[in-house]
Image (cartoon, rainbow, N blue to C red):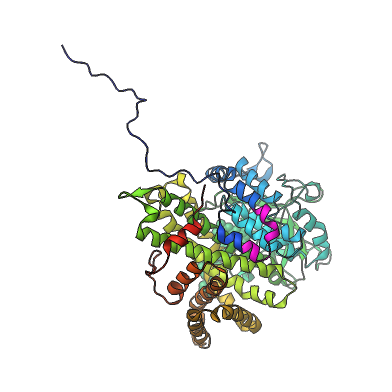
Amino acid sequence: MAVVEPRRSILEPTHEVRNQPPPLVHFNVFEQDRPLVEALEREGGGWAADRARAVGQISGGEALEWGRQANENPPVLRTHDRYGNRIDEVEYHPAYHKLMEVSVSHGLHSLPWTEERPGAHVARAAMFMVMGQAEGGHECPISMTYSAVPALRSTPELADEWVPRLTSTSYDPRLVPAADKAGSLFGMAMTEKQGGSDVRANTSVARPLNGGGAGAEYELTGHKWFCSAPMCDAFLVLAQADGGLSCFLLPRVLPDGARNTFRIQRLKDKLGNRSNASSEIEFAGAWTRMVGEPGRGVPTIIEMVNHTRLDCVLGSTAGMRAGVAQATHHTAHRSAFGKILAEQPLMQNVLADLCIESEAATVTAMRLARAYDSSGDEREVMFRRLATAVSKYWICKRAVVHAGEALECFGGAGFVEESGMPRLYREAPLNSIWEGSGNVICLDVLRGMARTPQATEVLMDEIEQGAAVERRLRTYLEGIQAELSDFEGIEARARRIVERLAIALQASLLVRYGDPAVADAFCVSRLESDWGRAFGTLPGGIDFQAIIERHTPHL
Ligand SMILES: Cc1cc2nc3c(=O)[nH]c(=O)nc-3n(C[C@H](O)[C@H](O)[C@H](O)COP(=O)(O)OP(=O)(O)OC[C@H]3O[C@@H](n4cnc5c(N)ncnc54)[C@H](O)[C@@H]3O)c2cc1C
């Protein structure tokens, strides 16, 4: 008689799940970021620590799941209603609206304009970075709304009408006349098919309806090749007019309730940033009003662009901090070859190097935000003229390789969507592209140095303050000065120069304000070049453990 083997229950476990880290959830993103907590206080935003803590709790809590949902369910374009009428609406997942609600209600789009007290830009910068770690895509309209205010102020009658709407902390996503809404959001549309960096090549045309000039009505015809967050209530748009390229305010809904002729042709299928809709649009005689003077489109909108460039710095810094938090957490709980990864010498070198890059970005981003707080101080205005572009170039560039290395700390798990690391990786290149791609930014720095020598002096003074206490920075600075005094082929050397300026600025800030072990490791690797071409190539003699401990979040 055959022996019948007992069948194994399908519920019977085949193995025990071991050596898997606990998820990094329910932690305070702000509180656990020591360089950020210190910088908020140092740069004058300490009064907002409780607010940052409140945002940090949400960002490390329920917002993580909203971030996942908003990216896995990207926005959908509805061009027409069921009867064939054009509606040009974009439908977002409810999780996106929740993210927007949190950011708007905490004033991430408006705080410095409603609380004009010292440290307001710094406070907002900290909260923007904290929330960006949960989800970066929704911060695009948050940033554009914050940044539109200084540009609108060039035309007081438009500012009087719109700034109170933009600074409201009520999130109201309805597509109805702005006057009927609890709060409004702003976008910008500059880039056209034939040119994004070179906006002077714009072909969209605006025709005056009753005389023209600042604040007057115009009818706009043309297109834009990239227009993010097209459900915003209004946009700053560049178009050709009598007098040259000019800036216009284009509302999506007209004051009488009819929809403006803002046609959304399609949404871009993007590498990352998937929660955020980026569209191609056409204007068929759209109703607009001129912002600033005729022919002054670029100087008018540059006020907005400077602030969105600051936010690119903040966004990339946030991405690096998210990578550090994830990588230090994962490796603190995962073993290989019988030992915790974060305790193994070579992994410690990688982690410490990632932490150093993240801390350098944090001190720089927060110092830069302080310069935006001091608009009445000519030196600070000069500082931000160059430091914004210098920092944007370098920090946004570093974020890309940083994300790849942070991802690798997870091994295979980092390549899997559930870890959140692929989203971080896909998001990373974006800040370097928009608001001036790498080369354009570097050329802008050269132009700024040539046109505004005082701005160069102020930036050099800031670096000097660190060089006064750090010999290695002094030597590095001499190298920069030699590079700058040679004009032969300087355009081709623009990246080289800007990279060095950025590293010198970061070193100056770290030696004065950063953790001493971090500052020393930064100087030996980035200034003395005792370093390789990948992260994890720091020389011996550095206290890796102390650096990693400083940056590891504790649940
Ligand atoms: C996801 C996403 C969302 C966006 N949202 C918006 C939006 O809401 N509104 C908006 O107006 N735009 C938006 N943009 C467009 C973005 O600002 C442009 O793509 C960017 O400014 C570059 O312009 P371009 O694509 O035309 O590239 P180009 O201008 O063709 O540049 C291509 C490359 O050439 C380089 N380059 C340009 N000039 C020089 C030079 N003189 N010397 C050397 N190199 C040079 C650039 O650095 C770049 O690397 C968005 C882009 C993306 C990816």
Q: Residue at x 68, y 68 (%)?
A: 372
Which is more toward the observer, 6 or 217? 6
Q: Does the magenta portion include 40?
A: yes
Q: Which percent across, then down, holds residue 84?
A: 67, 40
The picture quadrant where one finds residue 435 is: bottom right
Q: Is residue 421 left or right of residue 161?
A: left
Q: Residue furthest top?
A: 1
Q: Position of residue 309 (x, y in %)?
A: 61, 65
Where is residue 70 shown, x and y percent of the image? 57, 44
Instruction: Pick out the residue farthest to the left.
Output: 1
Residue 469 appears left or right of 451? left
Q: Quadrant of residue 37?
A: bottom right
Instruction: Give the residue displayed 49% in from the left and 65% down from the top.
Output: 357
Q: Is residue 24 visible?
A: yes
Residue nearest the viewer, comparing 248 with 92: 92
Q: Quadrant of ligand 1?
A: bottom right
Above or below, comparing residue 438 to residue 493 in the picture: above
Q: Nearer the viewer, residue 273 or 551?
A: 551
Highlighted range, magenta: 39-52
On the image, which quarter does residue 464 sit in?
bottom right
Tell me where residue 478 appears, x and y as whole percent: 50, 85
Main secondary-structure element of the magenta-colored stretch? helix
Whether residue 203 appears in this view of the structure is no
Please name whichever residue, 34 or 87, is drawn nearer the observer in this view of the structure. 34
- How many numbered markers are drawn? 0
Q: Quadrant of the N terminus?
A: top left
Does the segment drawn in magenta span residue 280?
Answer: no
Residue visible at 78% across and 47% down in the picture? 181
